[in-house]
Amino acid sequence: MRLVLIAALLASAAPVYAHETAPRVVQSKPVPKEELLKPPADAVQYVVVSEAGKHGNQWRWQLPDGRTAYRWSQELRGWITEMDQVTTFAPGGMIEALTVRGVTTSGDAAEEYRVANGRATWKTANDAGEAAAGGWYIPAGGIGIANAPMIDALAAAGDAGLNFLPSGKGRMTFGPTQVIQGPSGPKTVQLAFVSGILPSPFPVWLDENKHYFADISFISVIPAGYEGALKQLRNTQEKATAEAVAGIAKRFLAPAAKAPVLFDNVQLFDADKGAFLANRAVLAQDGKVAAIGAAGSLKAPAGTQIIDGRGKTLVPGIWDSHLHIGDDWDVLSNMANGITSFRSPGTNFDRAIEATQRRADHSLLMGEPFISVIIDKKDPLAAQGAEVVSSPEEAIAAVRRVKAAGLWGVKFYTSMNPAWIAPAAAEAHKLGLHVHGHVPAGMKPSEAVTAGYDELTHLNFVVMESMPRDVIDKANTRQRVEGPARYFKDVDLDAPLMKGFVADLAKKKTIVDPTIVIFEGMLTQDGGKPQPAYAPYMGIISPVLERSVFTAGGYPLIEGLTRDDYRKSYAKMVELVGRLHKAGVPIVAGTDGWGIELIRELEIYQQAGFTPAEAIQSATILPARVVGADKRTGSIAVGKEADMVLVDGDASTDLGALRRVVTVVSDGYVMDAGELRKAAGYSGTPK
């Protein structure tokens, strides 16, 4: 999640605070593309690119009246962004006014900001407010390069930093330089880190005059002609980030942190049996669970840390079964939330290998990863970061590269040729690799399972079994969301089609990774108030995230449908999760987000009919079984690895207690969760 946010960071937002007016949702139609400003031939051009290729452009130019204009045009696997922005700068360089128009993947991009009579006012589709003028306004949306002047001002401000509106303060520190090649020959650029916007510092590149140059991330924004420098710049900033975070890992993974620990008077969750056991004691020593007994019954060896567990629950280390490896700050945040193991279904080879190696040498504080690589057909709609192939032979070769790298699985994607799935999956199974993924366009999920899928990723691809053919055939576009949003509310789950499909999945023990929390956000939210997954984190992570993500509206409405229609389709999806579980289909909990959404995923499972114990099993012992690690982790049992999380509250009656992490034990290292959160940039405990 953080990589995606950084990619769009300069179009991020500041928080809504108590001094602002109440948020209000503005239902309006976006200004159509044809009416947006058109960049002139001499406009400064930036390209939006990833390893998969070019996705769009951003431009900057001056209008005859002196204002600065910007334009953003992009298509990312069928999702469209078409925006313009006009900014007026005051004589001192601050923003005096701005207007944003157009459409983003989240709907209407409309935003207004004005300064008059010493007051700053703003209004977006999700919020409105005012404050005393004097800070640099960070738009809720806007165009990335339009905030380059803010980066320039931060670079010039030094230790004094820069005040933001509606609130907050940022500072910049400087890193190494690099000489890159471009259309005008060699150019010297410098890495810098900005703090005070996201929970942890984020990278940005400056030119030789310490002005904004580029933003390098999963999806990058860079001046046209410099695309060839992406890998060089990415490697440099990842190395600098690793060096910054390595000191944190060293502190938490010190030898003293592996001293024996005794949790006494605790409620213990037995994941193997799915039972909560009151008044228990658990002793961990030498990285293993050494003993379990009644409260007060275990003798602690000399030097043991004793933790009183009254009013608390001890659960196995939490798994997120769909958590892409972000940068080093991301994985630190995951550990702070008790995620001691995870599956990363789509990590490129370089990141997978170096992150795993650095975890092994204790220079990276990260849960144990089980990594898949995405394989997709070479196509304009191919997945970013995928191994792209052009034939079944190339698909098989890509599978072999995954095995040779020592990784866990292959993830096929939506532009794959359906005919290539069976031979590639057969090779993966021959090599002992797990096969999962999105269902390719033109293929039904039942056909993907027949072709060799061990697991279906995302519930919308399970729903795809019931979709009309024109939706199935365009599942590598927006139709993979818009089809289920439009049609699923009217699908009869008791009719032979879906009832038989569920029964077949259960018979074959096909795993489902629903990530249903995504669809709660997409389909049920109007915007302007915190989404259920993020409400407990308001005020403690990042004011930018609060406005740009946590309170954002859901998926834009399709012509002829209402938000209530979407909500009915979402309710049917929740019902489907319950039916899958009741039928015996293995469900593993994942987020495809930042990890903080995981407990909400479990709460939705409970709404679908899971017991609290069954919900927690989906994020502990079940994923451990899926990856073949259940003999050594996934539950708290004598002889297993000491991967445990102490949470404040009774998780048997309140799954939300799992957010209130007190102590994390990973590979036997005992870590204070409050200190972990502080290191990751949190200012408090989730509510």
Image: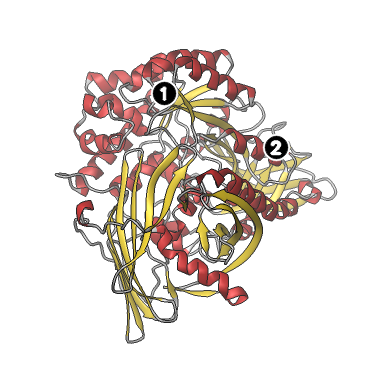
Q: Which residue sits at x=41%, y=81%?
A: 91
Q: Which mark is residue 655?
A: none
Q: In the rendered view, would you say 651 is above or below 86?
A: above
Quarter of the view holding residue 509: top left
Q: Position of residue 579 (x, y in %)?
A: 34, 29
Quarter of the view holding residue 491: top left
CA distance for labels 2 and 1: 37 Å
Q: Position of residue 149 (x, y in %)?
A: 46, 68
Q: Position of residue 585 (x, y in %)?
A: 41, 24
Which amino acid is tagged 2?
Gln
| Secondary-structure class at tag 2 | helix
Q: Decide if residue 531 is on the left or right side of residue 665.
A: left
| Secondary-structure class at tag 1 | loop
Q: Which residue sits at x=49%, y=62%?
A: 542
Task: From the viewer's side, name the closer residue of 149 and 608.
Answer: 149
Say few, some or many: other residues with alpha carbon within 10 Å of mark 2 (under 14 / 14 to 19 / 20 or more). few
Q: Position of residue 412 (x, y in %)?
A: 45, 26
Q: Which residue sits at x=20%, y=56%?
A: 35
Residue matched to label 2: 357
Task: From the viewer's side, name the closer residue of 340 and 365.
Answer: 365
The reply to whether residue 663 is in sight is no
Residue matched to label 1: 584
Q: Which residue sits at x=35%, y=17%?
A: 447
Residue sticking out furthest to the left: 560
Specify which label sits upstream in the sequence, 2 or 1.
Answer: 2
Which amino acid is tagged 1?
Gly
